[in-house]
């Protein structure tokens, strides 16, 4: 098998090839892929053979009912998805700028970010650039980094969840994220001054971050250190709206970032529990793809997130 040179790769690979690879990777079916691309199956089969001849290896297995990617084909499919996502973002930005807008910005954030830091930065950037099209995604840190890697986000606010992520993403800290245990104002434990042990709190249902998230792991470690089993009567969600609605609707115990709980505590809707559980605040910050400095609106938005006054002014001065 001969090696693929970068020069020859650039000469023969076209976006319609990437579209075919992505479509077939998603559908796993030649008939569906041909329908979605408005091509005949013979035409699609011919194009696929030409692509595989250029690569020098099969991209998809030919099974009776499906066409899953081969091991090497999976890498090609992933590249096609990343390249097409990047191209879609570029087209959206160009269309917006041509129509008199200020481009398109795609931002992701964890709970704490979407509660306070992100909304404040959005309000400020929209005052400066009213026609900016801005898309916001709320997710766990691991999902946000997958979206960054796939280029469906320009930047994200989260934290590292695995050591190897340090090699893929740059991290600019924004601040610690302290947590507290809360109940709604009608809960029998609301407003009580006595200190509750973790064992006593296990009698109540809990609403928690999903398993595998950093804060969930930290909570489980704290329970283990105290010699107490983690709660079994639980509801798990990443949705902030669902979290708060369920917490308000029943006698649940929830663990929330203090920044997110503050307004509800001030309004009397939630009450903090006095417990033995102590979680060290975790630092969160802006995550970007390593080796790809942000430019334009994305860079200015990051400046607003990191230092609302000083850094934002510096970004404007350098534009």
Image (cartoon, rainbow, N blue to C red):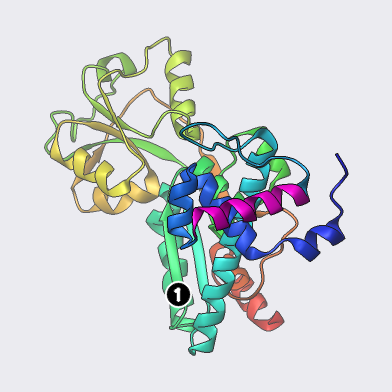
Q: Which residues are magenta?
A: 40-54
Task: Decide if residue 127 is in sight here.
Answer: yes
Q: Is 156 situated above or below 98? A: above
101 with respect to 56 (left or right): left
Q: Examine the structure image and report whether residue 227 is included in the region drawn in magenta.
A: no
- Residue 226 lies, with reference to residue 249, above or below; the image says above
In the drawing, does residue 248 fall left or right of residue 81? left
**Within the magenta stretch, is there residue 51?**
yes
Extreme-front residue of the structure = 42
**Residue that appears at 54% across and 63% down:** 305
**Which one is nearer the viewer's eye here, 275 or 48?**
48
Instruction: Tell me what residue is drawn at x 67 percent, y 42 percent.
Output: 75
Taking depth in this image into account, of 89 and 263 the one nearest to the observer is 89
- Observer able to see residue 171: no
Can you give x and y, in whole percent of width and height, for residue 62 in the image?
57, 35
Q: Secondary structure at mark 1?
A: strand
Q: Residues within 10 Å of mark 1 (few under 14, many from 20)?
A: some
Position of 301 with respect to 116 (left or right) is right
Q: Quadrant of the N terminus?
A: top right
What secondary structure prevails in the magenta region? helix
- The picture quadrant where one finds residue 123 is bottom left
Q: Pick whichever, 118 or 72, lies toward us.
A: 72
Q: Quadrant of residue 12?
A: bottom right
Residue at 23 percent of width and 40 percent of height = 271
Find residue 282 and report its horizontal and vertical position in percent: 53, 39
| Above or below 108: residue 180 | above
Instruction: Residue 298 in the image: state x and y as whole percent.
Output: 59, 69
Give the residue at mark 1. Answer: 133
């Amino acid at each position: 098998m001969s090696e693929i040179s970068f020069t020859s790769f650039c000469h023969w690979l076209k976006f319609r090839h990437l579209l075919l690879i992505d479509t077939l990777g998603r559908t796993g079916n030649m008939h569906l892929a041909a329908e979605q691309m408005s091509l005949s199956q013979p035409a699609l089969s011919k194009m696929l053979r030409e692509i595989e001849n250029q690569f020098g290896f099969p991209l998809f297995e030919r099974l009776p009912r499906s066409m899953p990617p081969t091991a090497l084909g999976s890498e090609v499919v992933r590249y096609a998805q990343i390249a097409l996502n990047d191209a879609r973002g570029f087209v959206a930005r160009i269309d917006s700028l041509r129509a008199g807008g200020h481009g398109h910005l795609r931002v992701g954030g964890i709970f704490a970010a979407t509660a306070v830091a992100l909304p404040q930065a959005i309000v400020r950037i929209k005052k400066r650039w009213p026609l900016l099209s801005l898309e916001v995604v709320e997710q766990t840190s691991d999902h946000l980094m997958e979206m960054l890697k796939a280029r469906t986000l320009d930047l994200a606010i989260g934290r590292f969840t695995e050591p190897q992520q340090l090699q893929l993403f740059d991290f600019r800290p924004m601040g610690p994220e302290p947590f507290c245990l809360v109940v709604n104002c009608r809960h029998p434990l609301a407003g009580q001054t006595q200190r509750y042990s973790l064992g006593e709190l296990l009698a109540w249902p809990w609403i928690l971050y999903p398993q595998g998230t950093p804060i969930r792991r930290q909570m489980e470690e704290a329970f283990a250190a105290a010699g107490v089993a983690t709660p079994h009567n639980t509801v798990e969600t990443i949705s902030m709206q669902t979290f708060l609605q369920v917490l308000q609707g029943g006698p649940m115990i929830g663990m929330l970032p203090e920044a997110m709980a503050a307004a509800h505590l001030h309004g009397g809707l939630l009450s903090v529990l006095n417990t033995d559980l102590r979680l060290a605040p975790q630092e969160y910050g802006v995550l970007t793809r390593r080796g790809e400095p942000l430019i334009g609106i994305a860079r200015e938005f990051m400046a607003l997130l990191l230092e609302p006054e000083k850094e934002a002014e510096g970004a404007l001065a350098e534009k």
